[in-house]
Image (cartoon, helix red, strand yellow):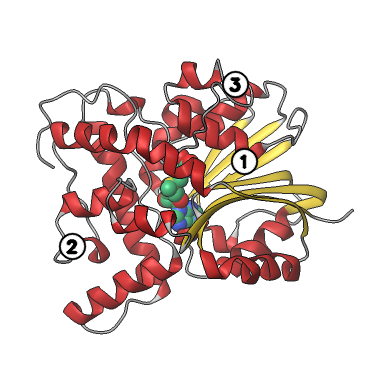
Amino acid sequence: MSRHPHRLTQPAVDAPGSSHREASVERQEASAERGPSPSASDAKESLRLFYNSFTDYLSAVPEGHRSKFINFGYADDQSPGRGVTGASEALGHVNSARLVLETIGGCPLDGKDLLEVGCGRGGPIGVVLDRFPSVRRVVGLDLSSSAVEFCRSYLSRPNVHFEVGDAENLPFPDSSFDVVLNIESACHYPDVNAFYRSAFRVLRPAGHFLYSDSIDGDQVDHRLALLRGAGFTVESTRDVTANILRSSDEVAALRFSLMQAAGMPTIAGPRWDSSKSIEERMAHALCLPGTARYHRFARAEQVFVIWTLRKPE
Ligand SMILES: C[S@@+](CC[C@H](N)C(=O)[O-])C[C@H]1O[C@@H](n2cnc3c(N)ncnc32)[C@H](O)[C@@H]1O
């Protein structure tokens, strides 16, 4: 890892989340260079290495420890929204905290046992603890051991724990949680239906699955069918693509320039060392205006949804 002489002065990093189609295009491009497509376990190993490298990068960048979120963020033309003031300012990132609150929606969390799958660097759980101080128990799970270690370094307390694990095979007994939260992470899972079934299994009857993610525009109905097939009732669906684009308009260029100033990360993993430069890959990850990802959202080829689902009583 190179040295990073400049200061990264605010939380500045956003998601490398790929839709399955984007991921598959990337795999096809990569396989044209390297041979056969990687298996699902190779894809997971690449992601694990990516998020480990990225977390290590943030640890090496001055002020990088303040980057607690890895999501596109949510913005609208009314400010502040959904009671975000306080939580967002305390945590240093308005749009990313807002996406968390929009995903939680009106679900009451006080007194509940909550699992966040794909907890990243802990920003969303920080929002939960800030907004719902009487939440009973919180568990954050992530594939990246570096991310989990980072979360443990500043967020652990008697009722808050972090574990390394795989969303597709959640390491918890049946009916252990009242709420499963999942923000901009499932786009990475090779078998998203295994995650849906696993989330259903670990939820108690009447438990909520609060889910936001980018999905290929023509896959929305199919995904809802998978969720119903797993046993969920769909309580509400929102398409918030316009809010994600507005957030990218507001913050992606700043985030990108802060990374350039600090020195781009060195990313490990086979999926990340193709012919594209790290700048191109990070611009894509950040959904920088002008990138193919941004245009896919703008043309609704990819949409960002917030869904509230429930396990029947
Ligand atoms: C874009 S980040 C979102 C992090 C966090 N939810 C947030 O909003 O800041 C996606 C996260 O999903 C995690 N992830 C990817 N695949 C996973 C899997 N199969 N199981 C658990 N976590 C996974 C990554 O390691 C990463 O931390």
Q: Quote the CA–CA distance across marks 3 and 2.
A: 39 Å
Which residue is the site of mark 3?
130
Of the pair 51 and 231, the residue shown nearer to us:
231
Q: Amino acid at mark 1?
A: Thr
Q: In this rendering, would 33 be left or right of 118?
A: left
Mark 3 close to ligand 1, CB under 8 Å: no
Residue 158 location, quadrant: top right
Determine whether 186 is above or below 115 in the image. below
- Residue displayed at 72% across by 59% down: 200
Mark 2, ligand 1, within 8 Å: the answer is no
Seen at 31% across and 23% down, the residue is: 10
Task: Inspect the image, locate mark 2, and give the three-letter code of the amino acid beneath it.
Answer: Asp
Q: Residues within 10 Å of mark 2 (few under 14, many from 20)?
A: some
Q: Amino acid at mark 3?
A: Asp
Q: Which badge, 1 or 3, is on the more N-terminal residue?
A: 1
Of the numbered discs 2 and 1, the one sitting upstream in the chain is 1
Q: Which residue is mark 2?
A: 273
Q: Could you say which is closer to the camera, residue 139 or residue 302?
A: 302
Q: Which residue is mark 1?
A: 103
